[in-house]
Amino acid sequence: MFIHRVPGSLVITAAAAYRVSPMTDINKYIALRTALLNEKAKLEARLGEISKALGQNDSVAVAATATPPSATTTTPGKRTHSEATKAKMRAAHQARLSKLKAKSGAGPVAAPAPAAPKKKRKISPEAKARMIAGPKKRWAKFNAAKAKAKK
């Protein structure tokens, strides 16, 4: 970014605002993340020291500082199933497949035949005549009123 120093003030030109590299944001993020991870390590070490001083075992300190598994395994906005749920789903799927295979005689499962297309409905000639007559009647009335108003 180009900064022009004028005595008594700081001026940033509009053209300079467009020259900001997106890499600077990434570099800032990386630096901030590194600093936070270092701070986390220091705090965990300090917590371990405090636990030892109090006579607690390390597993309590580690459990207190461990991140929840959902925070590390999932991305924000994405829903996932637990391993137990996946196992249940797998078992149910296997049961469905075995049931189909047993029904068909242990051969490969055949795809169901496509359903016959629905028969197209047809408008009766009387209904068509009514549909045509309605607008004609309304337009005749409208044109008659228009002709009457002209006179």
Image (cartoon, rainbow, N blue to C red):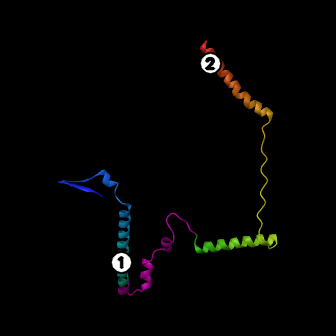
- Closest to the observer, 43 or 105: 105
Q: Position of residue 115 (x, y in %)?
A: 78, 55
Q: Is residue 73 left or right of residue 137?
A: left
The quadrant holding residue 18 is bottom left
Callout 1 amino acid: Leu
Q: Residues within 10 Å of mark 2 (few under 14, many from 20)?
A: few
Residue 93's place in the image compared with 116, above or below, is: below
- For label 1, the SS is helix
Q: Is residue 145 left or right of residue 56?
A: right
Q: Position of residue 32 (x, y in %)?
A: 35, 69
Figure quadrant of the C terminus: top right
Q: CA distance from mark 1 to mark 2?
A: 89 Å
Q: Is residue 136 left or right of residue 23?
A: right
Residue 150's place in the image compared with 53, above or below, is: above
Mark number, residue 81: none
Give the residue displayed 35% in from the left and 75% down from the top. Answer: 39
Which residue is disc 2 drawn over?
A: 146
Give the residue displayed 45% in from the left and 75% down from the top. Answer: 67
Give the residue displayed 58% in from the left and 70% down from the top. Answer: 81
The quadrant holding residue 128 is top right
Give the mark nearest the N terminus, 1 or 2.
1
Q: Which residues are magenta?
A: 51-80
Which residue is disc 1 drawn over?
A: 43
Q: Position of residue 36 (x, y in %)?
A: 36, 72
